[in-house]
Image: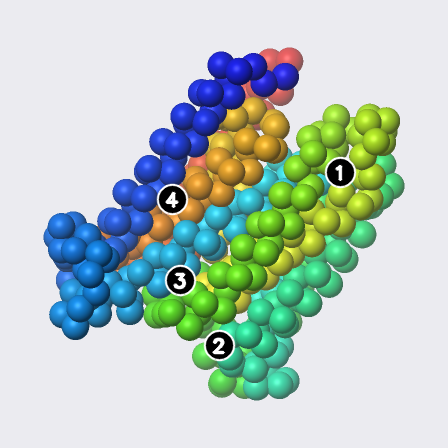
Amino acid sequence: MVTDRRRALLAIGLGGALLALVAVALLGLAVGSRALPLAEVLDVLGARDDSDAAIIVWEQRLPRTAIGVLVGAALAVGGTIAQGITRNPLADPALLGVSAGAALAIVVGSFAFGISTLAPQIVAASLGAAVVGGLVLSLAGYGKGGLGGVNLALIGLCMSSLIVAIVSVLVLLDANTLDEYRFWLVGALSGRGMPTLTTVAPVLLCGLAITGLAVRGLDALALGDDVARGLGVRVTQTRLVAGAGVIVLTATAVAATGPIAFVGLVVPHAARALTGPRHGWLLPYAAVMGATLLVLADVVGRVVTRPGELQVGVITALVGAPLVLVMLRRSRIAGAAL
């Protein structure tokens, strides 16, 4: 039960997180191979002109930062939903095979059909994510007493390994497919312009709206399927709706930026530590924190090797992998103490 005081504190915390996101987004507009003073960035945003600064902000950094916000929120919310429908704290879209399925579909589309534009890639990625994610869940025993964490992890790992093997064969057979795969190998925000933003933004916002429909059901699922049914929740329908949201969010994010690791795994745990298990607060916190993390990682990537840059997928992997190891160690320690 959330008391009025607790609700007020959560609202204040969410407001603070939004302010942090705005600050990081402004930093993303100011930092790059050519640094711009924050005052100049604000002036350009207030009144667009034909100056070099306006071109840099409006045509390069603003679309890139906006895509980072949307993709970061999508991956974090997708990871939160994946953990909710499986009741597995290690679940994320990558573990479910959704990310690998989306990337594989895009590579197959390039190899077999010559697909290279964004809109068909999103369709292909959605189909690949749905097929592979559904197959992993089915093999892990979906609908038969719940999903075992160990089974899900092992099956997801095996499926990802199989997909890597298939992709390796395809890229060896065709040079054009190899060029496409280089894009998907490490997630990146660089080079994403306004056409990418206008294509993926409506789909990602639709995916976020779909996940909002499953909030009440996800809270009940955390208590177990039998209890959820006793509370009047349609368990299968809730999982289908939530799973559809995960597929839309992840497939579109992968189509827009390539696979970006660890955001969907780490951020839900950080958000849950602040909000508790209720998804009505957990999902907004995860969305804001995921967006902030991805944009901040992008800014760091531009700074550490200036005038070059590290791709955002490299930064999230360097930060996320140690955090996952720490979480696993703490969970083992907590389990041994019980």
Could you tell me residue 107's position as x and y percent? 57, 75
Determine which residue is flagged by label 3. 188
Determine which residue is flagged by label 2. 180
How crowded is the residue under tag 4: few (<14 C-alpha within 10 Å), some, or many (20+)?
Answer: many
How crowded is the residue under tag 1: few (<14 C-alpha within 10 Å), some, or many (20+)?
Answer: some
Q: Earlier in the sequence, mark 1 or mark 3?
A: 1
Q: Earlier in the sequence, mark 2 or mark 3?
A: 2
Q: Tell me the amino acid under the disc marked 3.
A: Ala
Q: Are marks 2 and 3 in contact (CB under 8 Å)?
A: no
Q: Tell me the amino acid under the disc marked 4.
A: Thr
How crowded is the residue under tag 3: few (<14 C-alpha within 10 Å), some, or many (20+)?
Answer: many
Q: Earlier in the sequence, mark 1 or mark 2?
A: 1
Q: Earlier in the sequence, mark 2 or mark 4?
A: 2
Q: Tell me the amino acid under the disc marked 2.
A: Glu
Q: CA distance from mark 1 to mark 3?
A: 33 Å
Q: Are marks 2 and 4 in contact (CB under 8 Å)?
A: no
* Front of the two marks 4 and 3: 4
Determine which residue is flagged by label 4. 292
Could you tell me residue 312's position as x and y percent? 37, 56
Q: Earlier in the sequence, mark 4 or mark 3?
A: 3
Quadrant where the image shows the N terminus: top right
Q: Earlier in the sequence, mark 1 or mark 4?
A: 1
Residue beneath the point at 32% across and 38% down: 20
Q: Is residue 213 visible?
A: yes
Q: CA distance from mark 2 to mark 4?
A: 28 Å
Determine which residue is flagged by label 1. 148
Could you tell me residue 117's position as x and y percent? 51, 79
